[in-house]
Amino acid sequence: MAQQFTLPDLGEGITEAQIIKVLVKEGETIAEDQGLFEVETDKAAVEIPSPFAGVATKVHVKEGQTVNVGAVLISFDGNGSATAQKSAAAAVQQPPAKAAPPVAAKPTPTPTIAPAASAPVAASSSKRTSAPAAPAVRKLAREMGVDIDALDGSGPGGRVTREDVESAASGGGRPAAAGQPAAMARVAREMSIPTPPGVQDADKWGSVRRSPLSQIRKTIANQMVKSAFTIPHVTHIDQADISELERVRKEFNESTGSRVTAMAFLIRVVATALKRHPVFNASLDLEKGEIIYKDYVNIGVAVDTERGLVVPNVRDADGLSVTQIVAALAKIAESARTMQFAIEDLRGGTFTLTNVGALGGMFSTPIINHPEVAILGVGRAKETPVVRGGQIVVRTMMPLNLSFDHRIADGAQAARFCGDVIRFLENPVTMLF
């Protein structure tokens, strides 16, 4: 039976998505759970799988195109029975028990299937189908000059993994990028100057390139403008002596084999301080003239990814131990590496942490993540000569930059909040593992 596959509902408030990659061709035989498209919406990139098998008769969209929810993406002949559709819905909502999941670690929106006129199922095509792989793995393969469809995946159900691509690029697999060996492609890439993306153009001073904003960058731009022009920002700058914290952290890691990071301690500290200073764990309802104090503490962690800035949350951080926060951060790191965030992971934050120190910066004036009322920027910790007891000693100092909404919080409140953060950081034994 002929079917039309439409862009599914991608979550509350999401009305459109950008097609990042079309994974199938017209005339190609489509297997159930095979990836059809990589799409980017709001701040999450996901791969949309096929709910059942068939033959693609027409691809209605192209890469880079922005489409609305409900728009037809692809038409194909296949088995569109109610049973198959229910099975497809279950497959994209949770990891299936069978050996070939479409996406193992992320929830994918339920697809909408619009029946068309009845038609017989076409015969199987001899064309090669796309190898099952996550969007980030496909992107890596393109960058490394590897033909991902020529690889035998080592993952569940033959899914191609990051390791498969890296092995192929180093000569251990079957790369085939336009007949060029992967090693040669990699050397050429490393020796060349990267060209910015975009369409060649020119102005009166010389050549330029024009590149459309990605869906994520559009969201970031809108959010930053809204925050900057709505919230009167003030930034309070201070620093904490984390010498003792670093000693305790390293000893704990050595004795337990763990990898507790300073960021895990910082999240625990900030969550504790927010319970003492609830004005920074709130939002402002101007229409009703009310401050909304949140009884829950969801700490957003700003993460720099290849597609742009995302802010996933460590939920209920005030009830987590440091080691539990480490586990949450590990999950966030893996999601950032593969860009497999669920939409809900990026919502519901009450306070944001951004670590500019990871890239070498010390001081910043971070922009608040509206509708939150504060954000703490952490600078690069470094050994610094300071005076202690009349003596000059070397201590590890960490800069702290707190931007807050001056409509509902004052400088004195910001100073007291930072004072508690500093006190907790300088006395890490008060933080339970």
Image (tube, rainbow, N blue to C red):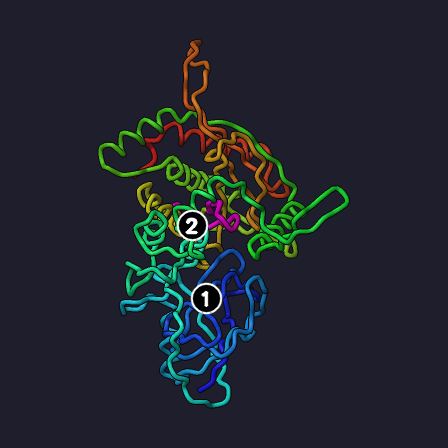
336 or 342: nearer the viewer: 336
Q: Which residue is mark 1?
A: 23
Q: Is residue 280 left or right of residue 47?
A: right
Q: Position of residue 369 (x, y in %)?
A: 56, 47
- Residue located at (41% from left, 73% from top): 50
Image quarter (top left, top right, bottom left or bottom right) of the C terminus: top left
The quadrant in which residue 218 appears is bottom right
Q: Is residue 2 left or right of residue 319?
A: right
Name the secondary structure under disc 1.
Answer: loop
Badge 1 amino acid: Leu
Q: Position of residue 238 (x, y in %)?
A: 52, 28
Image quarter (top left, top right, bottom left or bottom right) of the N terminus: bottom left
- Residue located at (45% from left, 69% from top): 24
Q: In the image, which residues are magenta?
A: 300-318
- Residue located at (72% from left, 43% from top): 206
Q: Which residue is mark 2?
A: 144
Residue 252 seen from this side: yes
Residues packed near mark 2 inside 10 Å, few (<14), some (14 to 19) or many (20 plus): many
Q: Position of residue 10 (x, y in %)?
A: 50, 66
